Amino acid sequence: MLGVMSDVVTPDFSDTPVWWNDTPPRALPLTPLPASTDVAVIGSGYTGLSAALTLARGGRGVHVLEAEHPGYGASTRNSGYVGFQLRNKLVPLMERIGAAPALAMAREAIAAHRHVVAFIEREQIACKFNYCGRYIPAHTPEVLESLKREAELMTREFGIAAEAVPKSREREEIGTDFFHGGLRVEMSGALHPGLYHAGLLDRTLASGAVVHAHTPATEIERLREGRFRVTTARGPIEVGAVILATNGYTGKGAPWLARRMIPVNAGVSISEPLSDERIASVMPKGRTTIDTRHNPLSFRVYPGGGRIQFSAARGLFARDHRQKAREMHAAFVAVFPHMNDMRIAHCWTGQMGFTFDELPHIGLHDGVHYAMGYCGSGVHMASWLGHKLGLRVLGSPDAATAFDGRELQSRWYYRGRPWFLPAYVHWTNFKDKRDLARARRST
């Protein structure tokens, strides 16, 4: 048993993203901005680089404007899950928006997954991709019934191998009795986010696109039809098209989008080195795992093995990453009490981009293209919708997507600062505790 809370973190604890150890932030030469170019892409994460790569290979002149170093945001801070679903599971999404649009979005999310896997294989990106499958534990018996319907739909509509696991067999997938069964799917994987971004950056630069680090865009001005001036900290640039790819880091330079994007803080923790036996006591099959609570626990085997990587206690911004590590540790050991002596060696945070309808969006506002709001499904959806943005600017008929035409909503009370998040997070945490208590009483 731990004696004091400070023992939760190791003596050499670090709050720098561990991915940066393998792929240090790229120091690009500070090249002059041209007076004009075909396309300016604002943001150098998965979305921006995917768009830039598609455009450059399509023959367009592309300059990527990044406020920090390339991939500074969520693209080199995320958990590295390569799923095929949206944040909204298919059954509740069908109930909310209708069967036809929900199925179309689900089908496209699968296409996004396959796009990323094919891209990694075709481009030979060494990012430790592993087709490990996923397990989704149900936190109540009622949710398990919904997951059974999910499995049936996946098999019938998409031909995806999926199986609902009853509580009596849950130990096959996860080393706890905390949940009430779950959903096992095979078409899911994991990668090293830093190495994936580095490979994407290498290919974007090789294609002829120019990436300008430490060049924040401060204003976008529409001059006339098909011409824009983008003002940056290093001067202006006139362009024929603008792509905004800033997601959870959208700032005051894009006020319309900032009022529609909710930056949600998320943390990732990495354990100290662990034996294979201890790791297997948590996840016997080594699948990525995300439970069904509003504020879920997610975990996987660290790329290369030897540690557990996990996320929890999302939503609230962290001023002290040691304290965030302790919060995440408490959430983990509440599910896995036998791991209470596990310590945390790394913990960092980043900002996910959420939307009010909890769906990704791609669109055009006042002549400016954008894609964002991945709500935690960013590896496959950002790569895919970035590619779609590039096709859209190229005028390709393949640019069409099931996410076209959906209004990117705001609320009258929101001005780009998520002042309501603490209350919302506390409310969802309360609902999770209430649901868990009811489930325990009913079993």
Image (tube, grey):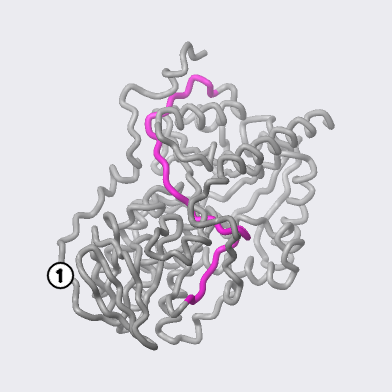
Q: Where is residue 39? Give x, y as percent.
A: 32, 78
Q: Is residue 197 magenta?
A: no
Q: Residue at x 62, y 43 (%)?
A: 424
Q: Nearer the viewer, residue 236 or 31?
A: 236
- The answer to whether 270 appears left or right of 20 in the picture is right
x, y percent for residue 177: 69, 30
Q: Is residue 312 above or below residue 364?
A: above
| Above or below, comparing residue 271 to residue 77 in the picture | above
Q: Viewed as shown, does residue 92 lie left or right of 310?
A: right
Quarter of the rendering containing residue 182: top right
The residue lying toward the viewer, choosing from 242 and 128, is 242
Query: What kind of residue is marked 1?
Result: Pro
| Residue segment shown in magenta | 339-365
Q: Measuring 15% from the left and 70% from the top, which residue is drawn there?
A: 32
The quarter in which the C terminus is drawn is top right
Vertical side of 336 occupied by 264: above or below = below
| Horizontal side, residue 138 vs residue 63: left or right | right
Q: Toward the viewer: 138 or 436?
A: 436
Asked whether residue 127 is in view, the answer is yes
Tag 1, which secondary structure? loop
- Res 232 → quadrant: bottom left
* Residue to which mark 1 is pinned: 32
